[in-house]
Image: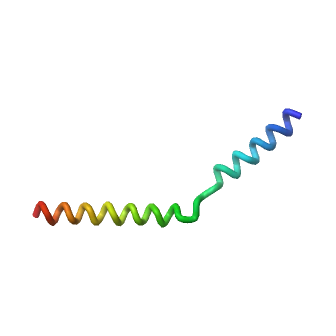
């Protein structure tokens, strides 16, 4: 019985670790753009 439980837990763990939200890459791009824009704005104000 414990072997069966271990198999189930392993399967669940694999599923959870393999899950990747589809918008993850998109979100990262948005953040990168925002940071770049803020940096540009700050340089413009300093310059």
Quarter of the view holding residue 22: bottom right
Give how far across and how far down residue 4 sits, in percent. 86, 39
- Residue at the extreme top: 2
The way the protein has been coloured in the rendering is rainbow
Give the mark count. Answer: 0
Q: Residue at x 28, y 66 (%)?
A: 37
Q: Nearer the viewer, residue 24 or 14?
A: 24
Q: Quadrant of the N terminus?
A: top right
In this rendering, is residue 24 above or below 14? below
- Residue at the extreme left: 47
From the viewer's perspective, is 4 left or right of 23?
right
Q: Residue at x 70, y 52 (%)?
A: 15
Q: Residue at x 85, y 36 (%)?
A: 3
From the viewer's perspective, is 30 left or right of 5?
left
Q: Quadrant of the C terminus?
A: bottom left
Give how far across and how far down residue 23 sits, in percent. 53, 64
In this rendering, is residue 25 above or below 8? below
Give how far across and how far down residue 18 sits, in percent. 65, 54
Give how far across and how far down residue 10 sits, in percent. 75, 43
């Amino acid at each position: 019985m414990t072997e069966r439980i271990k198999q189930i837990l392993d399967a669940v763990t694999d599923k959870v670790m393999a899950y990747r939200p589809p918008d993850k890459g998109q979100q990262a791009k948005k953040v990168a753009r925002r940071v770049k824009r803020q940096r540009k704005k700050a340089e413009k104000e300093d310059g």
